[in-house]
């Protein structure tokens, strides 16, 4: 007896629709990355190598940075000396002579004003000039507020003021007594090839050393008196405070190295190891910058021929 086959039952409508539609795609579940156990940091060797690489980079970059900074300071120094040159020529046009190395105050005969104090109008320091009476001591000037920007080299690490002590050769008080405080400057006049040091004491003994340069005392010097030529004669040069502090204002002539604080002598070479404190020096590498009589500024190298160096510092070299 054969069993009758029954036709297949139709699927429910819901199930049939489910088979006909594609299944919905669900985004995969985001799983947090599994942390590996035992992951190590820098090893000691890697750390040392990194430090070494950084050290090498610093060693390579630091000199370049320092050179860039010194180059910027040099540009400023040169511009300052050029401004001094303009003021110097302005004074010459007005007075028909270069400023003297110093000028003794009439009512204070032991105080002498520097050549630079006579250039204040050309250095845009009229306010400071109004505080000075060139016939008397500068009692109304606060040295700490009297630093003139155009008279400071940015490469020179200077303090705003310094104390001028009594000279060992003076009869006015014991050596070492502070006579006065003075504002600092980086630039001094070229007195020639002899020192102006202790001129006051030597003058009292009738043995003064007269300067043979362009910025001297007790002599009227015009640009026409510079027989070597304006482009071959030094007027003003640098001196670093590390050698001896200098000033633009003036000095008490009874002080130690008094006249040397406002003028300098070209006797050997700039920055030489055996230089006297009255010579020229700077913190610039390779030499010191000078203002020349024609107004240009140029570096005089440390290894300049001493004979030529002395000739450049003289009004009438022989």
Image (cartoon, rainbow, N blue to C red):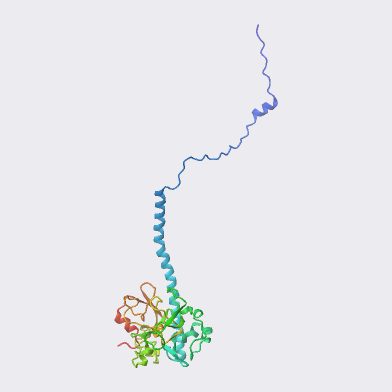
> Which residue is rendered at x = 30% and y = 80% of the image?
306
* Relative image position of residue 204 (x, y in whole percent): 37, 92
293 and 196: which is toward the camera = 196
Q: Residue furthest front?
A: 174
Q: Residue furthest right?
A: 13
> Which residue is rendered at x = 67% and y = 26% of the image?
16
In the figure, residue 312 lies in which quadrant?
A: bottom left
Q: Quadrant of the C terminus?
A: bottom left
313 and 96: which is toward the camera = 313
* Relative image position of residue 84 (x, y in whole percent): 45, 82
Count of numbered tags: 0
Relative to 179, is 272 on the left or the right? left
* Relative image position of residue 266 (x, y in whole percent): 34, 82
9 and 123: which is toward the camera = 123
* Relative image position of residue 183 (x, y in whole percent): 47, 80
Query: Does residue 95 appear in the picture of this structure?
Result: yes
Q: Residue furthest top?
A: 1
Q: Quadrant of the N terminus?
A: top right
Query: Does residue 184 appear in the picture of this structure?
Result: no
Relative to 120, is 289 on the left or the right? left
232 and 63: which is toward the camera = 63
> Which residue is rendered at x = 44% and y = 72% of the image?
73
In the figure, residue 210 lies in which quadrant?
A: bottom left
């Amino acid at each position: 007896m054969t069993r009758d086959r029954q036709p297949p039952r139709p699927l429910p409508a819901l199930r049939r629709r489910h088979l006909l539609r594609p299944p919905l795609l669900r985004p995969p579940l985001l799983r947090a990355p599994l942390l590996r156990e035992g992951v190590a940091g820098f090893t000691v060797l890697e750390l040392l190598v990194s430090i070494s690489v950084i050290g090498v980079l610093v060693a390579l970059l630091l000199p370049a940075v320092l050179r860039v900074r010194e180059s910027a300071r040099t540009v400023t120094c040169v511009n300052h000396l050029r401004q001094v040159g303009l003021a110097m020529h302005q004074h010459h046009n007005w007075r028909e002579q270069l400023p003297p190395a110093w000028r003794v105050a009439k009512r204070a005969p032991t105080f002498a004003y520097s050549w630079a104090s006579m250039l204040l109008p050309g250095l845009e320091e009229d306010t400071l000039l109004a505080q000075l009476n060139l016939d008397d001591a500068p009692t109304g000037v606060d040295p700490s507020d009297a630093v003139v920007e155009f008279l400071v080299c940015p490469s020179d690490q200077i303090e705003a003021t310094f104390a001028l002590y009594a000279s060992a050769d003076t009869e006015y008080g014991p050596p070492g007594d502070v006579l006065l405080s003075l504002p600092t400057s980086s630039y001094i006049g070229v007195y020639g090839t002899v020192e102006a040091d202790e001129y006051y004491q030597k003058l009292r003994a009738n043995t003064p050393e007269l300067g043979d340069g362009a910025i001297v005392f007790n002599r009227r010097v015009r640009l026409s008196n510079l027989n070597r030529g304006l482009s071959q004669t030094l007027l003003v040069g640098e001196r670093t405070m590390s050698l001896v502090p200098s000033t633009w204002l003036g000095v008490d002539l009874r002080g130690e190295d008094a006249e040397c604080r406002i003028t300098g002598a070209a006797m050997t070479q700039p920055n030489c190891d055996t230089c006297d404190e009255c010579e020229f020096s700077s913190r610039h590498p390779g030499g010191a910058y000078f203002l020349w009589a024609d107004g240009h500024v140029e570096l005089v190298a440390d290894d300049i021929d001493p004979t030529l160096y002395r000739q450049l510092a003289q009004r009438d070299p022989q």
